[in-house]
Structure formats: C-alpha cells, structure tokens
Amino acid sequence: MITALSSDDPNTVSRYRILGLLGAGGMGRVLLGLGPDGRFVAIKQIHSRLLDDGDYRSRFHREVAISTRVSGAFTAAVVDFDTTGEIPWLASVFIAGVPLDTAVGQYGALPVASVRTLASGLASALHSIHTTGLIHRDLKPANVILAKDGPRVIDFGIARGTESEESLTEVGSVLGSPAYMSPEQAGAGAITAASDIFSLGSLLYMAATGMSPFAAASAPVTLFNIVHTEPDLAPVPEQLRELIAGCLRKDPRERPTAAQILDYLGILAIQGNPWPAPIHQDIAAQTARMRELTADPERTQIILGAPPHRLVPPDQPKRRRGRLLGVACAVVIVIVAATAAVALLRGNTPAPPNAAGPAAVMPTLAQLRGVDACAWLRQALGPTLPQSVATGVRRETDSWRWTTTSSWGCDGSSGTGRMIVEIGGALMGFASTQREVGQLDLLRRGRDCAFAVAGSEQASWGISVDIGLAVDCALAEYAIDRLVAALPSLVVDPAIARSLASIDPCDLVTEEEIRAAGSSGPGVPTAHSCSWGGDGRVRVDVGRPDDLDSGTILAINAVDIGEGTLVYNADFNLGRDDRGCSSTYRFRAVDASRHETVTVRVVGSSLAVRRCPAGEAIVAGLVTRLPQR
C-alpha cells in the first residue's frame, strides 16, 4: 500500500517532488517522485537508523555503482543518484506494468507465446547484466515487471560482480529468495552467472504453470528440493520443456548461457500485446491514472476511498501536499495495479466474504494446541472451494490431499494448488491490510498470497493461510474467512492432546537454564515454540518433522548427554558474527518417517557462550519434564 508521508518526511529529494511512500525493506525505503520533466521515478533511500553504520552506507554505494553499470531494453534504468549526501538515494525509472507474481496470481499461468516472450526478454536482460561482469542473484517473479512492450528486470540490491569475493550477507538474512535460488546458492557454493540461469528456469516454470518447481512448506525443504530433487516437468507445456529443463540442470556447467538461450529462441513473431488481455488492461488503466497525476502539479493526491481515477474535485480549493497530508482524514496516495520499478506492491484482491460479519473470538494458545488442524480446516471450507484462477475449475475439498505439518498445522495440495494453514504460529512479516474478517484485523505477508489473523493486538502469533507462490489469493482469503467463521466449532482432539503438541514450550525450561545459556527475560510463546532474548538467544521448538526435514546431519552428529539420552547437534551461521547450534531430542516415533522432537537453538555473538553444550544442558533438563511416552 502506498502511504502518505509523515511530517518528518521531505517534500522533495533533490529536484524530485515526493508524492508518497511506495514501501520499505530491511535496508531502505522507496518513495514515489515526480521529476521536473514530468517523469515518475522510484527513489530508494537508506533508512535513517542506518546512516551512522558505515557498512550499510558502503552497501548502498555498491548497489548504486552496480545499478548504474546495467543498461539494456529489459532493465529499469537509473536516472539519478547521490551517495555522498546526508541521506543517500537512488532514482530509477518508474515502470508502468504488472509484477509477474501479481499477473500469474490474478490471471493464471501465461500462454506459451507469452512465456517465450518473457524468456527472450529476461535472457536479453541477463546477457546485458552478465556482460558487465555482474550477477543479479535474486531473479524472482516479484523482480520482473510485465510492461506493455516486454518484461523488465529490477532490483539489484544483492547483485555483485563476478570477480568479487566479498560477502554481502547481513545478520539474520538469507541472500536470495529460497524458491528461486540455484543449487549453488542453497548449498553455499561458488556463484557464477549460471546461477541466474537456474533462477530463470524456475521463474519460467512458474510463469508457465502457476507454481514453483521446488517450493515446499518450509524453507529448509525448499532448499533441499533445489539441491537434491529433479523438477516435475509434466505440467510444463511441451513447447517449453527443453528450454526450462536446460536451465534447471543441477550442474551449472551444463546450463545454457543467456546468449545461447537467445539463439535457441531465435527471432520471435512480433506481438503488439505480448501478454494476456487483462494484463494489458491493467497496464493501460495504470498509465491513464499516472497521466492524471501529471495533469496538474498541485493536484497529485487522491482522496482515500474515492475511485482511483477521481482526483480532488475542481470546485475545491487547491492545497499544497504538505497541508493535504497533515489533515486528520489521513489522505494517502493511491496507485492501483502494478508498482514502481521496485515492485513493492501487489494488485488488489477481493475483500473476504464475511468481512462485515459477527465478531470472532480468538482461542488461546492452550486451546489451539489440541486442535486437529486438517479436520478443522476441511470442516470450515465445506465441500467445494472457489474455482481455480489457473484453470477456472471449481475444486472439491475431498479431492485434495491433506497432511499434518511438522508444527501440527495442515498442508493441503491438489493438481491445481496448495494451501498451508498454521494455527498458533508466528506472524513474522505480516502487516495489516486495513480490512477485517469477522471484525478481526486481516493481515497479509508482503505481496504473498498469505493471510492471517492475530491472537490479539499484542500477540505475535495467530492463524495463517499461505497459498505459497502468489497463484490464488482469492482462495487464501476465502480460507481465512471460513476459518474465522468456524472458530466457535474448534474441538480438542484427544490424540493430539496426548502428544507433544499440547506442551507449552515455555514451561519446559527454567529461568536458571536460560541464564546459564546467556539469555534472559520472559519467554515469548507461539503454539509450539518459545524464545528468549538477551545476548545469547535461546529458542525451544516442539514439532513432528519428517526425518529428512530434520537434516541428514542429525545422523552423524549424535551426542550422548547421559543415561542414553541422544542429542543431535547442528551448527549454523546467521551472519559473520552471529552463530548458533541446534540440539534436537527425538521424543518418540510418529511413523516410519517422522519423530516428535524438541529442538533447542542457542544463538549469540559472544564467545563466552558455548552454544552446543548450552543447548545440550537445556535438553538434559527438559527431558525430565516431558510426559511419559
């Protein structure tokens, strides 16, 4: 959502008039600007809280240097920048178009001809990027804009030169988007231009089918699939299989180069409209609205709640933007359909069916822990689901395959989609949509088709529905609406109540054990985890993961901590100075491939905290507090 500027925000950045805030990320924010020549630009600025950090300034300077090296018909051109001022900034051309993930999510998979146009444009963009000695490293649907004359590649925030060995990883971050990483990225191997080609293959697969070839219910499983499993090419149209299969070869030496892809595709037939008609209609509507914003330099705000095309009526007095944005009615800038060159927005989705229905009452975590999520979900959804965006076919609930997740949620899948529901899980990344469902605040995670409601205003947990890769937002909203409506029908399942699912993880550890691990403070709970802050961060997770999901390293890192109690340790890195150790105890077998487990993670930058021994000590204590098997 584009929001109004605060009183502390500037009215101008250099020669650009600022109209509103497009969005923000971990490193900076992006503003919508209007140049003196009437062109719209997306202006990226570093966050003010990071201005005193030399590392962040250096990284922003590197992004600017990289972005200015890139040129070509299929990239978003840099038009201006300043890296030495009080607040560094970078201005890029505003692309009128629809992000690829939004296009597929709203209108389904692209036809073969459109995918070939997409492949040719992206290969041309990568050829321009690679010939300058750069690697994009984050090619994903959200970073591709479908403009009226072809695709555009945007966002070089984590790009780097092929000759550079410098790590750009930030503390607590993953470099790249898991579902579109290459095996080299997933396995921390050497990154070359071939990594972008693998990402291109995953992106084309998604464009042609509406789903990712490797995405799973969790990031670890997704990365495992990328490294170890071959993609199922059956859903890919036959005309595209050879191209996509070549890009998705595990060995980077066997993948084609961008130039070879262009040679393979050859000269494509000229298309006046390369995308399906609804996408071009969205582009035309956005372009028309942008023209309205330039018609009168002092009438660039749209009244909240008015139709997107209706500006301030002519009979009202003109006001300067600063005054408009300061009034109590909270004027915001609205630009619908596609986003700026940074692709920080998604298209609008319909409001939930019972948004104005009776008020819902959220259960407590203790109540949610004993619920059979799949049984509750199937009851809430009813016999028939809304029709598929990709196929237009109505879906029967019983035709889906419903399985319990590692955190006692529910994972539903069919030939036309996927749905993952978590009850009592963390809501990291979710933010208010300014809409309600059952009079509860409806939350959404970024531009994903993932919606949630929180346990309370203060709670960091709630009930969430994730459709995965932005292919069916209407289904996600339908599901969260039905779940909220079915809250009064929640029933505790005796079998789950007898499992580790019913355990409050915060009760498994004492204050003394937390302090001994270098942490402190009260535990922050979700249904099946509890975390403590402090220099040595501690988290306890209770789950029932698949043994492969637990990591094959568990088989070789077993430690006997006394009386035959085995703990499986695994070291991990969150950043240069932020390391950790996870210690997993297998409580009991669920079936041939799953165990109920308790995992203790100890993370910290202090060398005084011996992380694996600290985790082992906590496990030794909590084992005595677990129920009898």
Image (cartoon, rainbow, N blue to C red):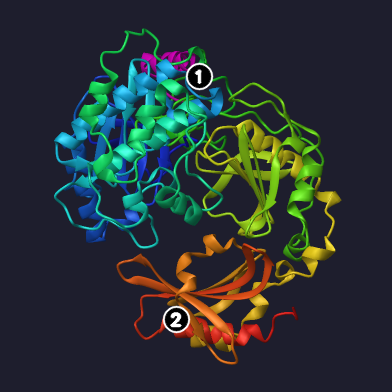
Write the residue at 30% across / 67% down: 576
Residue 174's spot in the image, x, y percent?
A: 38, 55
Reading the image, the residue beneath label 2 is 612
223 displayed left or right of 560: left
Residue 366's spot in the image, x, y percent?
A: 76, 66
Write the residue at 40% across / 42% down: 180
287 displayed left or right of 381: left
Is-magenta flag for residue 78? no
Is-magenta flag for residue 295? yes
- Dominant secondary structure (helix, strand or loop) of the stretch shown in magenta: helix
- Residue type at tag 2: Cys
Region in magenta: 279-301
Q: Say which element carries label 1.
A: loop
Q: Nearer the viewer, residue 426 or 208?
A: 208
Q: Nearer the viewer, residue 321 or 282?
A: 282
The crowd level at tag 2 (other Cα within 10 Å; few <14, some 14-19, many 20+) is many
